[in-house]
Amino acid sequence: MRRLGISLGLVVTSAVFFRASAQEAKPSAGVADDFVSAGSAPPLPEPLAAALAGIRAESLAAHIAFLASPALEGRGLGSRGLDAAAEYAAASMALAGVPPLAAGYFQAVPLREVSGLAGEVTVETRQGGSVQTLTFASGEDCLLPEIPPQTLTAPVVFAGHGIREEKRGHDDYAGLDVRGKIVLVLRGVPGGEAWRDPEVASRYDARKPGERWEAKQETAGAAGAVAVLAAEGDDFANDVATRPRPTSFFLPLDAANDAPPVVRVSPAVARALLATVGLDTASAGTAKPRELPGVTATLRAAGTVRLTSSRNVFGLLAGSDPELRDEVVILGAHLDHLGRSGDLVHPGADDNASGVSAALEIARAFAWRPTRPRRTVAFAFWTGEEDGKLGSGYYVRHPLWPLARTRAYVNLDMIGHPWRPEELRKLVTEKGLPGADEFLAKVDPRAFTDPGLPLDAAHVEEALRWAGPAAGMTLYLDRTDGTHGGSDYRDFARARVPWVRFFGNFFPGYHEPGDTPANLDPAQVQRMARLAFATAWHLAER
């Protein structure tokens, strides 16, 4: 899982078995209504209880051990290890009795592989009769994003922090015409108490570059900018020196990225641009956004492009109700991980052999039930999540089942590590939960999680409120639009398909060679898998 703007925003709801009302869910008026206590769930029907009990930690551990084994070499995109994982997922579904679509288990995902990316940013300043040209090389004073070879030249506009927040009365683009231009944007947020909100910080000032620039990139694109020069701080030089440089990367073949490329630039680049209007990086933070008269920038990216492809894996169980079986609930997990970095292998046990193992065992649990749910249930195993949600994005653009008849997408990613007691206490304290001490005394952090869900999907909320107690889990419902999410639910959210995000917790070995089967708890994967099964069952049955 590549976390792009994913905050562990958490929501927890009072325990109820079913919601009698079908009215649309809205953000809760009271904090207590955001917590779902495991409580004492009513007895489950025997076949359903047996299906939950049949999701065993031993079976999950066996899947994880294979998928994260040295033989699969980290399941990097374009590798034989990822191909082997795809074959394994298909074979496992076949053995469980989950059939493919008519065309088979695999959906080809066409890609472009770009290797040897190099380039530069050139700044040209024309003032009076003089012309000054400065060139900044990628890997020194700038870092090019993963883009195809191209050359782009445009005037430069200073757009402040690049933030447009109506509810805070702030718009850095007010009065600026940036259509067809390159915007220079500062890192972080404006000063003042109003900008210290954790949600704002996670959106605009996150530690990881991909997280802190994504929303600003989207805002710049909506304003018509063709590129973003993202001014970093004094830690940029260290970031450049320690940042691994991939020898190649992958892009979708069928879709151009409409978002303007974000080129991270050093303070030296920002100073050169701001000096043309008498500013520096310190004064610019409180200065009004403005045109930079006579200043243009040229972005040059060079590299070699090769056409290739990867595969999603897809199986489904037809629903039992003739009137509802044309609706589908999709449960998915990404197969890929980071592969090799020289001699180092990133096993990806938690990220995301844990989610894949859960999806495989949930598929078996559905297939082996004596009766099928009323709606169709599909199981998807995505390629290219770590490289930009390539597999799930391709599926959303080329669905194998109409999106209009997709009741919900349920995502499993990194479910092998539980919450810690101090994290749970911090959550309930920050949220101001009434009776926090009493609540904490009753909750085992290992049986707590924070599923993500849309703001306006009542049937998804209803399913989670039922599934939590059914699976013995206490929940905090994290209501968000999901469109900046860091896993494969993102493109479903952008297509307005209801979704659920199941995620465990980060741990020190995230995206490191230490993400091994020995460092996760199969019992935690089991708890999350049972919760996901119960959620998918409710969505498919009710």
Image (spheres, rainbow, N blue to C red):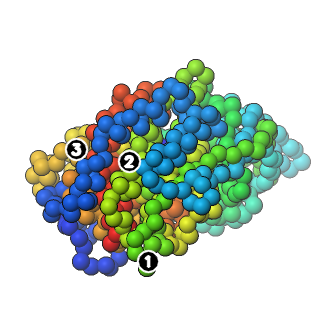
Of the numbered discs 1 and 3, the one sitting upstream in the chain is 1
Q: Residues within 10 Å of mark 2 (few under 14, many from 20)?
A: many
Q: Amino acid at mark 1?
A: Pro
The residue lying furthest to the top in this view is 343
Q: Nearer the viewer, mark 2 or mark 1?
A: 1
Coordinates of residue 459 in the picture (x, y in percent): 35, 71
Of the numbered discs 2 and 3, the one sitting upstream in the chain is 2
Q: Amino acid at mark 3?
A: Pro
Q: Which mark is residue 445?
A: 3
Is 20 displayed left or right of 112 in the figure?
Answer: left
Of the numbered discs 2 and 1, the one sitting upstream in the chain is 1
Is 95 displayed left or right of 75 in the figure?
Answer: left
Is 257 displayed left or right of 133 in the figure?
Answer: left
Q: Which mark is residue 62?
A: none
Q: Which mark is residue 361?
A: 2
- Cα separation, mark 2 vs mark 1, equals 26 Å
Coordinates of residue 164 in the picture (x, y in percent): 53, 62
Write down the residue under mark 1: 322
Circle 2: element type: helix
The residue lying furthest to the right in this view is 129
- Which of the 4 image quadrants contains residue 376? bottom left
